Amino acid sequence: MKPVKKKRTTFSIIIPFIIIALVFSLLLWRKYRASLPQPQVPQVQQPAVAQSAILFFVADGSRLGREAREIEPCKESSECLRDILEELFSGPVGDLNDALPEGALFNSVLIEGDKVTVDVNNNFVAEMPSGSSAEMLAVYSVVNTVCINFPQIKFVKLNVDGESKVALKHLDLADPIPADYSLEQKPDLKPKTNAVPKKQ
């Protein structure tokens, strides 16, 4: 009976060591796995979504018409506005006609609260076709384009090469101008206009 007791005593001492060894082995294995560099999941860049803008050009030779245009994604309002005006001044791509005079370009834009100042080059005045209708369509193609794409903007001031006191043959542009979407209507409806007629 004595040998049996020795075997049981030896076995009962070995079991705790085996358990401790297994626990330490498991802990060391987990630590080793944690130290291994994790495979990097490649970041997939989402394609930038183009933004849609509305531009105003001439329809039927006598009124304004809308043309939808996609522009590059932009973050700041001033950046977006410059992109939209570049598209406007580059002319229509559909069935509408250009409202702006030949060679007219914009120099800069400045957003101040609910007003935007758009500075254009001298061709906007010098190359303007004769007639009050041509002047109205050119001016409001810019004004309406700005205001419809930026609802927080209520007025647009047009300067020419830095000059703020600007007057066309029939329109005085010295003051900021609100949008006038009635110019999209047929001409026989005689839309009400906001631009100040030039004093004779």
Image (cartoon, helix red, strand yellow):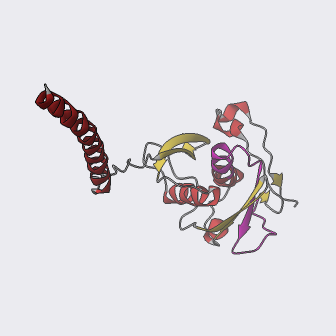
Q: What range of the chain is rendered magenta?
A: 143-170
Q: Is residue 62 visible?
A: yes
* Residue 33 pos. (x, y %): 27, 50
Q: In the rendering, at what x and y percent does residue 11 appear? A: 19, 34
Q: Quadrant of the N terminus?
A: top left
Q: Say left or right for 57 vs 166.
A: left
At 84% from the left and 59% from the top, the residue drawn is 175
**Which residue is drawn at the image coordinates 54% and 64% (left, top)?**
102
Q: Quadrant of residue 85?
A: bottom right
Q: Is residue 35 above or below residue 64?
A: below
Spot occupied by residue 112 in the image (x, y as percentages of width and height): 77, 60
Q: Nearer the viewer, residue 200 or 173?
A: 173
Is residue 64 or residue 74 the one in the foreground? Answer: 74
Q: Nearer the viewer, residue 113 or 38?
A: 38
Vertical placement of residue 152 versus 170, above or below:
above
Does the magenta portion include 167?
A: yes
* Magenta-colored stretch includes residue 147: yes
Where residue 87 appears, as percent x and y from the top left, is: 51, 56
Residue 41 visible here:
no
